[in-house]
Image (tube, grey):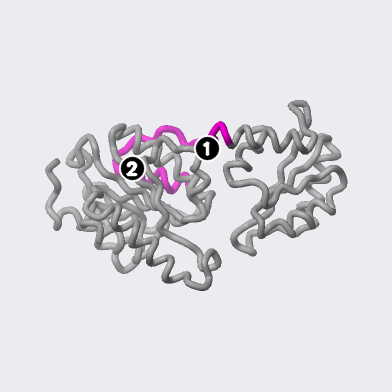
């Protein structure tokens, strides 16, 4: 594949003229970067789907937060591999910087010299732009990032914050000259996870006729968490209107919160926090 000259590949601009899709050939090596939580990873699905549709034989790598990537553990057909790039300090507080640097080094070793195009969804920051440039000066596309915007071959400027994440991602795809393939999200569930969810629900006394309401109150950021009594009151109202029971999910650290909410629900409530993986919760949601 004939690769564009370096000076042409790193020039900035606010239009799609900075990237010639045809020059990438039929099997480009693409990296999609998502610096976000699990929701952001799911919001990236329409963009990944459009890239796969445009290049069925492309090698597509998704870079995301280490704790968010398991949400796609069921097998995303639009990404050939999913690698961790970001972490949060509370995931490994004692040696956070060392572990984070080691993780990034391993990811860099897997990608250096093997990337043609990088698509940054939402803000990723100068350090990520520099990291991607160090992979061999691939083409980079995304919104304005900061001091290293000159490394973006396609710079869309500041994003419209009145739009949702999927809409902002779609703008990037369209400005690249790629046709979107719907804006719906998808999640893939392995048979083993689906069987586990069915067995867990059956163990709690649920059958196919039971109406189940699932509540997931946890959030990585405290500012996004709702008050306990509001969760309990809302779940109680649903029970009074629809019957059935409530399942409160979350991770092991969120179990005390889940237990507090369940204890204040006026009706049958079960705590699954700490017992279900992300895909397991998705399996339960598929059932409920």
Q: Is residue 170 magenta?
A: yes
> Outermost residue, top direction?
209
Q: Residue at x 76, y 36 (%)?
A: 203
Expressed as whole percent of the image width and height from the top left, the position of residue 81 reads 38, 44
Q: How far apart are the alpha carbons under marks 1 and 2?
A: 17 Å
Expressed as whole percent of the image width and height from the top left, the position of residue 194 reads 61, 33
Asked if residue 162 can be seen in this view, the reply is yes
Expressed as whole percent of the image width and height from the top left, the position of residue 69 reads 48, 49
Q: Give left or right: position of 211 versus 23.
A: right
Expressed as whole percent of the image width and height from the top left, the position of residue 273 reads 69, 51
Q: Which mark is residue 187?
A: 1
Q: Residue at x 77, y 33 (%)?
A: 206
Residue 27 higher or lower than 66, as above or below: above
Badge 1 crowding class, 10 Å Cα cut-off, few under 14, some 14 to 19, many 20 or more, is some
Residue 87 higher or lower than 172, as above or below: below
Which corner quadrant holds the N terminus?
top left
Q: Which mark is residue 60?
A: 2
Badge 2 crowding class, 10 Å Cα cut-off, few under 14, some 14 to 19, many 20 or more, is many
Span of residues in magenta? 166-192
Q: Residue at x 69, y 53 (%)?
A: 217
Residue 158 higher or lower than 210, as above or below: below
User: Foreground residue, 169 or 273?
Assistant: 273
């Amino acid at each position: 594949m004939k690769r564009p000259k370096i000076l042409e590949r790193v020039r900035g601009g606010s239009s799609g003229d900075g990237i010639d899709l045809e020059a990438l050939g039929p099997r480009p090596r693409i990296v999609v970067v998502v610096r976000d939580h699990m929701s952001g990873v799911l919001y990236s699905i329409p963009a990944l789907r459009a890239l796969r549709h445009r290049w069925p034989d492309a090698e597509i790598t998704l870079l995301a937060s280490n704790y968010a990537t398991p949400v796609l553990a069921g097998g995303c057909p639009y990404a050939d591999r999913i690698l961790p790039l970001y972490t949060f300090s509370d995931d490994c507080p004692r040696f956070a910087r060392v572990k984070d640097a080691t993780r990034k080094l391993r990811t860099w070793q897997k990608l250096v010299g093997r990337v043609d195009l990088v698509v940054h969804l939402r803000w990723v920051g100068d350090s990520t732009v520099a990291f991607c440039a160090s992979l061999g000066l691939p083409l980079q596309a995304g919104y304005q990032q900061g001091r290293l915007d000159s490394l973006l071959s396609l710079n869309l400027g500041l994003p419209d914050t009145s739009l949702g994440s999927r809409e902002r991602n779609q703008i990037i795809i369209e400005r690249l000259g790629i046709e979107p393939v719907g804006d719906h999200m998808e999640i893939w569930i392995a048979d083993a996870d689906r069987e586990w969810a069915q067995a867990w629900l059956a163990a709690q006394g649920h059958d196919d006729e039971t109406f189940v309401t699932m509540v997931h109150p946890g959030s990585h950021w405290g500012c996004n968490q709702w008050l306990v009594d509001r969760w309990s009151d809302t779940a109680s109202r649903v029970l009074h209107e629809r019957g059935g029971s409530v399942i409160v999910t979350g991770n092991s650290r969120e179990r005390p919160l889940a237990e507090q909410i369940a204890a204040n629900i006026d009706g049958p409530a079960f705590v699954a926090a700490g017992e279900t993986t992300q895909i397991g919760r998705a399996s339960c949601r598929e059932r409920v």
